[in-house]
Image (cartoon, rainbow, N blue to C red):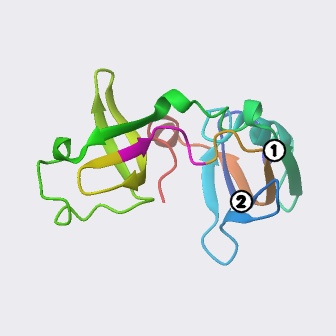
């Protein structure tokens, strides 16, 4: 069926994510819907499985454990580095804040990390996804489903 969620379909949906304690983590309700291409690993596996076969107007609820969400936490991805490694600027002139996402240059190329702690001399960064290790409650309402264009399949959804 043309407007059923399956691989290579561009899906527009409103999404709300809560943690296992019911705390709201994020939502698109009241904002623009989120876009993703089904089957392209743009959503956590467990949530994408719950969306498969749904159509416009459907509401989906999915409880997703870490193994099917953002993975388990890996404490080896928590690292403290000298602040001087980041642009060599003085401690309070670099504009860095706890919670900020920055890009770390590694032997394997650039990697996004979050600043989780810092002082005058060092910064602790976390390479885990912010939701790693968490069981998440996904709620969604499907707004639109259509074939993804060749450009969207090559470059991802464009807003």
Task: Please tell me which residue lies in front, 66 or 140.
Answer: 66
Q: Is residue 122 left or right of residue 24?
A: left
Task: Please tell me which residue lies in front, 60 or 95.
Answer: 95
Q: Residue at x 61, y 74 (%)?
A: 31
Res 82 quadrant in image: top left
* Label 1 packing within 10 angstroms: few (<14), some (14-19), many (20+): many
Question: Label 2 vs label 1: CA separation?
Answer: 10 Å
Task: Please tell me which residue lies in front, 126 or 39.
Answer: 126
Task: Please tell me which residue lies in front, 90 or 39.
Answer: 90
Earlier sequence position, callout 2 versus callout 1: 2
Picture coordinates of residue 36, whole percent (x, y): 61, 48
Q: Residue at x 79, y 53 (%)?
A: 138
| Residue found at the very far bottom of the displayed protein | 30
**Bounds of the magenta segment:** 124-130
Q: Is label 2 in a helix, a strand or a loop?
A: strand
Picture coordinates of residue 118, whole percent (x, y): 35, 54
Q: Please report contact status of discs 2 and 1: CB closer than 8 Å, yes or no.
A: yes
Residue 85 in the magenta stretch? The answer is no
Q: Does residue 22 lie above or below 52 as drawn?
A: below
Q: Which residue is mark 1?
A: 51
Quadrant where the N terminus sits is top right
Picture coordinates of residue 46, whole percent (x, y): 79, 37
Q: Does residue 102 lie above or below 59 as drawn?
A: above
| Residue found at the very far top of the displayed protein | 107
Q: Which residue is mark 2?
A: 13
Q: Residue at x 68, y 49 (%)?
A: 146
Q: Is residue 133 left or right of residue 3?
A: left
Q: Is residue 9 left or right of residue 2?
A: left
Picture coordinates of residue 134, whole percent (x, y): 72, 44
**Label tally:** 2
* Label 2 packing within 10 angstroms: few (<14), some (14-19), many (20+): many
């Amino acid at each position: 069926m043309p407007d059923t969620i399956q691989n290579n379909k561009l899906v527009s949906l409103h999404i709300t994510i809560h943690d296992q304690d019911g705390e709201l983590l994020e939502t698109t309700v009241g904002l623009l819907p989120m876009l993703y291409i089904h089957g392209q690993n743009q959503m956590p596996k467990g949530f994408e499985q719950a969306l498969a076969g749904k159509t416009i107007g459907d509401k989906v609820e999915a409880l997703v454990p870490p193994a099917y969400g953002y993975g388990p936490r890996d404490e080896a991805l928590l690292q403290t580095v000298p602040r001087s490694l980041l642009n060599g600027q003085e401690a309070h002139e670099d504009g860095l804040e706890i919670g900020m996402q920055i890009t770390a240059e590694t032997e394997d190329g650039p990697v996004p990390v979050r600043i989780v702690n810092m002082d005058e001399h060092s910064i602790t960064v976390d390479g885990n996804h912010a939701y790693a290790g968490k069981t998440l409650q996904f709620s969604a309402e499907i707004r639109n489903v259509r074939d993804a264009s060749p450009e969207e399949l090559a470059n991802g959804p464009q807003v």
